[in-house]
Image (spheres, rainbow, N blue to C red):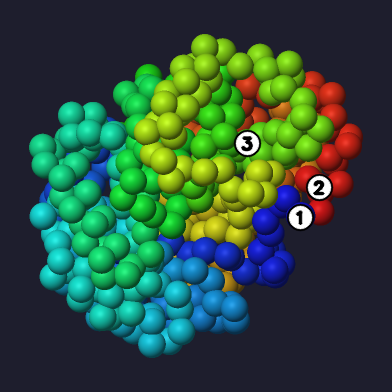
């Protein structure tokens, strides 16, 4: 089985996914918010007409069409979000929405967005209970609004992705969040790793060793649930390494200096799995990597003002769709081209044997060092230290 998921087309020519920040208006006050959202919609944001032009520009990449996600802030704070969704869906784009856990996440809004052509939504859940989640989101009641909206969306038949941002506030709660995602049901659990930008602070981060522990925990959790990471690209390296060890029945702790965080997370994961009788590992126990995309490399983010960023967490503009087409910016921006060229990576990322499949978080490198080509500052892996890298080199370069 091929372990590395790759888009079927050249990522130099087209993205796999386009994210549009429809607004920064939101009624939450999340600790990590990259957009530093506020209650009111910016009058200078892309208009309805400009939003339709953006959709037309996405279609210029050709078929199969990129995935199109409308995010925020809270996209339900835009009065025209239903009309924009309908326009995109009618033009053939696969449309997803990322609303916030507020009173706007209700059955009326979800029914309308589904009728407009939205196929999937992503919801953020940063704690397994109201105390942890609401403290993180800054508004009491967000947990219940999120869970109720989640259940309603499932009843409507919408596909659901649950997003969880890992911070020091919920590190040991991850197994219980996993349990809740399995209990209620979701297509994918997407685990975000904090980038210190916007309201996100370095002191909210977990350590590089804790990153490694979490990623190994996620590998084990992925046997029971669809799972991927965001701004945690070194998870793909962990998947390849763990897949090799499992193929030859080699114990993980003999090859990785995993700390007590991994033990604690795994102990709790075992308890959660035991409490869910239907939780059985997938028969093909060898996991596959998440889709191989990175900032400007199969992925592009359009801000509410039309600026084209490699990622929502890397706020450096390659151009503006108000005066240059998205296709032109994605293909020809020097910054975007540099981000796709792994030979330009510096430090450990430049030397790492897994840089073609990982590449590290360019967003976190920029946030921490000011250089988007610098080494991933929260990766604990020492290039060349895994003794079987040469045996799986073909997998990581294919």
The answer to whether the residue labelled 3 contacts the one labelled 2, judged by CB atoms less than 8 Å apart, is: no
Q: Which mark is residue 395?
A: 2
Q: Which residue is mark 3?
A: 234
Looking at this rendering, what residue extends furthest in the front direction? Answer: 277
Name the side, left or right, on which 74 lies relative to 333. Answer: left
Left or right, 228 with reference to 138: right
The image quarter containing residue 382 is: top right
Residue 38 pos. (x, y %): 17, 47
Residue at 45% across, 78% down: 93
Please report whichever mark, 3 or 2, sits nearer to the chain's N-terminal start.
3
- Residue found farthest to the right: 390
* Structural distance between the alpha carbons of marks 3 and 2: 15 Å
Query: In the rendered image, which quarter is residue 94 located in?
Result: bottom left
Q: Residue at x 16, y 50 (%)?
A: 145
Q: Which residue, given by chain and number where applicable, does mark 1 sit on? A: 2
The vertical placement of 234 against 381, above or below, is below
Question: Compared with residue 182, is residue 346 higher up or lower down, i.e. above or below?
Answer: above
- How far, Cα to Cα, is label 2 from label 1? 8 Å
Image point (66%, 39%), residue name? 239
**Which residue does the image show at 25% across and 66% down from the upper left?**
155
């Amino acid at each position: 089985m091929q372990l590395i998921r790759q888009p079927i087309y050249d990522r130099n020519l087209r993205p796999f996914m386009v994210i549009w920040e429809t607004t920064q208006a939101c009624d939450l006050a999340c600790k990590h918010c990259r957009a530093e959202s506020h209650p009111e919609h910016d009058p200078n944001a892309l208009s309805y007409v400009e939003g339709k032009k953006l959709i037309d520009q996405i279609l210029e990449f050709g078929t199969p069409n990129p995935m199109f996600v409308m995010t925020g802030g809270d996209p339900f704070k835009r009065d025209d979000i239903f009309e924009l969704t309908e326009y995109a869906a009618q033009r053939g784009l696969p449309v997803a929405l990322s609303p916030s856990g507020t009173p706007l996440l209700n059955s009326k809004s979800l029914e309308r967005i589904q009728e407009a052509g939205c196929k999937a939504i992503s919801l953020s859940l940063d704690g397994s209970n109201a105390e942890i989640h609401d403290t993180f989101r800054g508004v009491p009641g967000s947990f219940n609004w999120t869970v109720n909206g989640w259940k309603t969306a499932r009843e409507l038949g919408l596909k659901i992705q649950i997003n969880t941002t890992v911070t020091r506030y919920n590190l040991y709660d991850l197994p219980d969040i996993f349990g809740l995602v399995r209990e209620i049901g979701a297509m994918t659990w997407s685990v975000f790793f904090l980038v210190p930008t916007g309201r996100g602070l370095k002191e909210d981060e977990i350590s590089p060793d804790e990153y490694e522990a979490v990623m190994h925990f996620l590998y084990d959790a992925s046997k029971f649930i669809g799972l991927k990471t965001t701004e945690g690209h070194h998870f793909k390296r962990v998947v390849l390494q763990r897949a090799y060890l499992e193929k030859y029945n080699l114990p993980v702790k003999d090859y990785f200096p995993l700390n007590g965080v991994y033990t604690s997370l795994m102990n709790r994961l075992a308890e959660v799995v035991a409490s869910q009788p239907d939780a059985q590992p997938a028969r093909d126990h060898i996991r596959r990597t998440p889709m191989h995309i990175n900032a400007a490399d199969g992925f592009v983010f359009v801000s509410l003002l039309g600026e084209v960023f490699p990622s929502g967490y890397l706020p450096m503009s390659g151009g503006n769709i108000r005066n240059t087409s998205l296709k032109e910016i994605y293909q020809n921006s020097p910054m975007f081209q540099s981000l796709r060229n792994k030979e330009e990576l510096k430090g450990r990322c430049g030397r790492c044997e897994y840089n073609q499949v990982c590449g590290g978080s360019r967003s976190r490198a920029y946030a921490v060092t000011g250089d988007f080509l610098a080494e991933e500052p929260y990766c604990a892996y020492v290039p060349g230290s895994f003794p079987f890298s040469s045996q799986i080199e073909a997998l990581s370069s294919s």
